[in-house]
Image (tube, coloured by chain):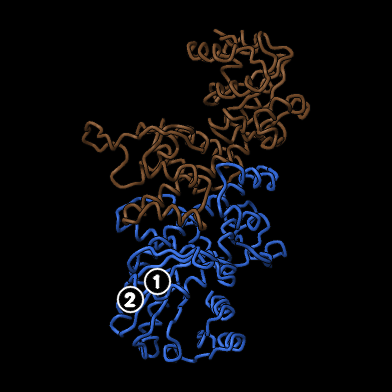
Chain colours: A brown, B blue
Amino acid sequence: MGANMARHLSENGYHVAAVFDPKLEAAQALATEIGATACSSLAEVSRLAKTIFTVVTDDKAQLQIFANRKDNLLKSAPGRTFVNCATVAPETHQKVARLCHAAGAASLEACMASSITQARNGTLYLMCGGEKRVFLKLKPVLEALSDHGKLLRYIGETGRAAQLKALVNMVMNINTAALAEGLALGDALGQDLSVVREVFSQTGAASRVLATDGDDMVNRDHACFFSGAHAAKDSAIALALAKTQKLHLPLAQATLAQFERLVAAGLGGLDKSGIAELTFRGRGPAPSKPKRPSQKSQPARASKKH
Amino acid sequence: MGANMARHLSENGYHVAAVFDPKLEAAQALATEIGATACSSLAEVSRLAKTIFTVVTDDKAQLQIFANRKDNLLKSAPGRTFVNCATVAPETHQKVARLCHAAGAASLEACMASSITQARNGTLYLMCGGEKRVFLKLKPVLEALSDHGKLLRYIGETGRAAQLKALVNMVMNINTAALAEGLALGDALGQDLSVVREVFSQTGAASRVLATDGDDMVNRDHACFFSGAHAAKDSAIALALAKTQKLHLPLAQATLAQFERLVAAGLGGLDKSGIAELTFRGRGPAPSKPKRPSQKSQPARASKKH
C-alpha cells in the first residue's frame, strides 16, 4: 500500500523525499524507482521528510514505529506531521497522537477503505480523524490520494476514523463470510455458480464483496489484496469496541471465529476470499492425513481485482 | 403480492378471470377493481381460469391448496397450468408437481426475488423451475411480470428455482443481520449514522440491503415488505438444504437464531429491517417489566422501499 501511494504521489508532482521498509532492499528498489532516499532507520525518515505517511500491519507495529527505544520516527520529529493509515484500534491512534504531541509533532489518522489498486491510482477512500487544523493543512496531499478529494472524509477527533473503519470491515467481513456460505451451498447442490452469482447480483443478496470476491471464491483465486488474517484482526477490533458498549453481535462473532479458523489452518495469508476454502465441500484445511497438495488445491494467482 | 400481480396483468392486456383469498372480502374488493370473479372455493378458481398463479405464505399452505380434502385447486384441473410463486422448500414444489401431474395438470415454480412494488410494476425477478415446455408455453405471461422478460430466468427442473431462491434469501438475511450489527455499533459509539451509511455505501460494506433497509433500521421504520418471520422461514429452508449436504454454515445459523429471536419476541411481523430492534442499544423486545409502549418504541409506517 505504502509503496503504491508513494508511486502515485511521485507521479503527481509530489517530491517523495524518503522511504522506509524493514526489508531495506524493498525500500531501495522503490527509492530508485521514484528518486527518493531509502532510509536505514526510522529516525532518518523524520529527518528527511516533513509529512510522513505510515502504513503498518497491526497495532503493535503502529506503536513500535513511534515508541521503539532503539529507533523510532519521533527521534527528530518537531514540526513533522504523521499520517497514519493502518487499520488499528482507535486507542492506538489516540496513543500515537499523544506521543506525537509530546514530541512536538502533529498526527492524523487516515484510514483507508480501499486496496492496492486504489492506492496506485490515487483513488483511496480516506476517512480522517484528528485535529481539524491538521486535516486542513494536509488536505492537498490527501486529495491527491483520494480521487481529487471526492473520496476524502473528515470524520472527527482522533480514533473516530478508526472506529468507522472497524465498522466497515466488520460488515464487509460478515458479508464475505455470508457469500462464501451461499456459493458453497449452491455448489454442493449442483447449481450453476455463474447463474447463482448472476441471480445474487440482481437481488437482495447483492453486495460489494459479491463483485470483488465472488469469482475468486469460485475459482479459488485467493491472491492477497486484503488477507484473511487482517480480516480476523479487524473483526476483533470491532468486537472489542462492541464489548465496551455491552453490545451482543452474534454475526460479527461467528465471522471472527471463521477467519480465526482460517488463520489457525495456516491460510491467513490468503485473500479474505479464502474464507470460501472453509465452506466449499472438498476444500479447506488439509485433512488429518497430510498429502502433497494437488494442483487444484493450490490457489491460483490473481490478475486483478477490486 | 398476488393482488398486485393480478393488477399488473389486468392493466397489460390479460384477462384475470378469477381471484381467491381466504378472506373473501379481500378477493371481492380486488375482483371489483379488475373485473374478475371472486371465488369462494379453490375448485371454482380452476374451473374459471386456465393458468393459475398461487402465492401463499409457507409450505403447509402450498400443500393444502393442492391437497386439502375439503377444497383444493385440483378438483377440476385437467389441462390447467399452475404457477407457484411462494418461497417454499424445493421438495414442496416437487410434491406439488407430482400432485398436478397425477390430476392431469401442469405446474411451474416461479420464485420471486423481489417485493410488492415490483409485483405492482411487473418488474419481478422470476426464477423458474419445472419442465422446459411448460416454461416456454407460459413465457409471454411470465415476461409480462418480469420487465418484458429481462428479469426472467429458467433455472432447471422442479425444485431448482426454490433452491436458488433459498440461497438468495439466506445471503440476503445474513447481510441484513450484519447491517443491523454495524449500524447498532456505530450508534452506540456515537457515530453520525448518516456518515456511517454513506461510508458503507462507498466501501466493502456496501450491499443491496444497505440501500433498501439502512434508513429503515436507523429510523425504526419497519412497515413490512418482507417480514422477519419469512426471513426466519427462508433461512431455515436453506439450512435444511445445507444439512442434506453436510455443510456447516455458521453465519446462516447465527442469522436464523437472530430472526427466531425476533419472532419469539412477537416482532416477526415487522419487516426484516426490524432485526435492528435486537441490536441497537435501548431498543428490542420489551424489558421484563411490561410498560405502555411510548411513541418512539412504535415502528413508524413506511412510505416506500425496494
User: In the depicted view, which residue is nearer to us: B300 or B278?
Assistant: B300
Q: Residue furthest right?
A: A133
Return the mark for residue B131: none
Q: Is A211 left, or right, of A127 in this rendering?
A: left
Q: Which residue is drawn at the image coordinates 31% and 37% (left, top)?
A: A285
Say above or below: A273 vs A25: below
Q: Is residue A255 left or right of residue A54?
A: left
- Residue at disc 2, secondary structure: helix
Left or right side of A261 for A89: right
The location of residue B234, given as percent across then percent down, is: 44, 63
N-term mark: 1 or 2: 2
Q: Which quadrant of the figure has residue A12?
A: top right
> Counting other residues with Cα less than 10 Å from the Cα at mark 2, is it few (<14), some (14-19), or many (20 or more)?
many
Which residue corresponds to mark 1? B109
Q: Label 1: chain?
A: B
Q: Are marks 1 and 2 in contact (CB under 8 Å)?
A: yes
Quick one: quadrant of the N terminus of chain B? Answer: bottom right
Marks 1 and 2 share the same chain:
yes
Q: Position of residue A101 (x, y in %)?
A: 72, 19
The quadrant in which the C terminus of chain B is found is bottom right
User: Mark 1 is on which residue type?
Assistant: Glu
Residue A6 lies, in percent from the top left, at 60, 21
Amino acid carrying mark 2 in the image: Ala
* Residue A200: % across, % down: 47, 55
- C-alpha distance separating marks 1 and 2: 9 Å
Question: Residue B287, relative to residue A222: is it above or below?
Answer: below
The residue tagged 2 is: B97
Residue B226: name its quadrant.
Answer: bottom right
Tag 2, which chain? B
* Residue B158, image quadrant: bottom left
